[in-house]
Image (tube, rainbow, N blue to C red):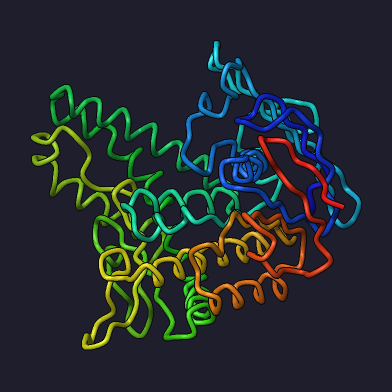
């Protein structure tokens, strides 16, 4: 899969243009504030139809403008071609998504068509930030890789919203509990899918973190809000039952136990909306690994964030059977030379597909010397450099 062209209209500070991309990709050089990250944001917007920087759609409209539209044309190695576009009107607050010229019945049908993974300095917040940042990472990866996950997550959120509204209103307990089965049915499938992903990719995360840091591997764990192991424990000689049914039993038990407290607090206190993805590392003088969010150094947190993105790329390659487009947004700015070289080696060896990277100056990257066309950007205008 590679991006052949990108049409821009009214997006951030970027000049309206049609950019043609070579199969190898491009290296975009420009001073800070000129629009390098905005360009990668426009591309990745067409992957999940949200800003990877957390910006609302209206913030993506150019100052003084009323709407934006971005359209990508992509091509697979076997010659199949697709187009995906998204537009947002600030006045009506309406977003329109089209796939090959037609609006899909559900937005989920168009998510992941571009097939891109973005590496950004802001990724450190996945590790250092609140659990919501790590849940968002998990939900995006699974929405892109697991059929049906997005719909299940959306159903869970709808039921949770209704249940929380009743709790805030002080509704009778019986009325609140009428929503419990819907909450458990969707929520237990969400938790089971998250746990399966962590179990499947834990070893790869450990390998990537060790390769980047040159030190001991880090550990990836999933921590449900209703206990570390599903209800029922492990059978003799086996591993804990991590099926949705097993998680559902634990979920119901906690809803019953916390019912009175939820009535007092006016909110649902257990479920996948309160789970966490834990990132752990060995620490000198401690027998148990420590949580990188609390105890990790800046270098360790950045290493873990990059390793997570590597695993995301590997997940998409495995599930979609194609190499993703790699977007590198000034990712080496805060890494030491050793870590930067090891990341570049991984990109070259494992993800030798299309690469689009940004940097303030040419000396900040050493990827595919002579192979990546060099572009420049100033004031939102992208120019191919001879």
Point out residue 351 in the picture as x, y percentages from the top left corner: 71, 68
Q: Residue at left 56%, top 64%?
A: 332
Residue sitting farthest toward the top: 91
Looking at this view, is 267 or 61 the one in front? 61
Q: Residue at left 67%, top 33%?
A: 14
Residue 77's place in the image compared with 101, above or below, is: below
Point out residue 30 in the picture as x, y percentages from the top left corner: 66, 48
Say which quadrant the N terminus sits in: bottom right
Looking at this view, is 196 or 382 the one in front? 382
Q: Residue at left 42%, top 50%?
A: 190
Looking at this view, is 148 or 86 the one in front? 86
Residue 266's place in the image compared with 357, above or below, is: above
Q: Residue at left 48%, top 79%?
A: 213
Point out residue 159 in the picture as x, y percentages from the top left corner: 35, 33
Point out residue 191 in the picture as x, y percentages from the top left corner: 39, 55
| Figure disc tally | 0
- Please say whether residue 197 is visible from this viewpoint: no
- Quick check: 317 left or right of 128? right
- Quick check: 76 left or right of 298? right
- Quick check: 170 left or right of 326? left
- Please say whether residue 351 is visible from this viewpoint: yes
Looking at this view, is 151 or 252 the one in front? 151
């Amino acid at each position: 899969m590679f991006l052949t062209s990108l049409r821009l209209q009214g997006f951030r500070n970027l000049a309206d243009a049609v950019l043609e991309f070579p199969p190898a990709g491009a290296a975009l050089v420009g001073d800070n504030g000129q629009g390098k990250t905005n360009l990668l944001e426009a591309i990745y917007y067409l992957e999940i139809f949200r800003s990877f920087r957390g910006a609302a759609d209206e913030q993506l409209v150019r100052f003084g403008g009323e709407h934006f539209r971005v359209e990508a044309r992509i091509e697979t190695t076997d010659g199949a071609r697709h187009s995906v576009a998204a537009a947002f009107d600030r006045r009506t607050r309406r977003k329109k998504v089209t796939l090959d010229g037609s609006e899909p019945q559900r937005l989920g049908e168009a998510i992941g068509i571009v097939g891109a993974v973005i590496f950004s300095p802001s990724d450190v917040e996945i590790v250092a930030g609140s659990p919501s940042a790590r849940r968002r990472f998990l939900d995006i990866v699974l929405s892109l890789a697991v059929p049906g996950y997005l719909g299940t997550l959306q159903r869970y959120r709808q039921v949770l919203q209704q249940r929380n509204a009743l709790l805030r209103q002080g509704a009778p307990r019986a009325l609140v509990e009428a929503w419990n089965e819907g909450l458990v049915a969707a929520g237990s499938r969400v938790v089971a899918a998250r746990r399966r992903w962590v179990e499947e990719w834990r070893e790869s995360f450990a390998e990537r973190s060790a390769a980047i840091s040159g030190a001991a591997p880090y550990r990836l764990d999933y921590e449900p809000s209703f206990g570390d192991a599903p209800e029922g424990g492990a059978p003799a000689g086996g591993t804990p039952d991590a099926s949705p049914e097993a998680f559902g039993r634990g979920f119901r038990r906690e809803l019953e136990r916390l019912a009175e407290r939820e009535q007092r607090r006016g909110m649902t206190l257990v479920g996948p909306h309160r789970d966490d993805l834990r990132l752990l590392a060995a620490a000198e003088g401690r027998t148990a690994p420590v949580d990188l969010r609390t105890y990790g150094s800046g270098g360790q947190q950045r290493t873990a964030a990059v390793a997570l993105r590597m695993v995301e790329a590997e997940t998409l390659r495995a599930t979609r059977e194609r190499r993703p487009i790699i977007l590198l947004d000034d990712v080496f700015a805060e890494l030491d030379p050793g870590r930067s070289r090891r990341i570049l080696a991984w990109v070259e060896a494992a993800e030798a597909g299309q690469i689009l990277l940004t940097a303030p100056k040419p000396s900040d990257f050493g990827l595919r010397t002579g192979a990546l066309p060099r572009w420049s950007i100033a004031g939102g205008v992208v120019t191919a450099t001879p």
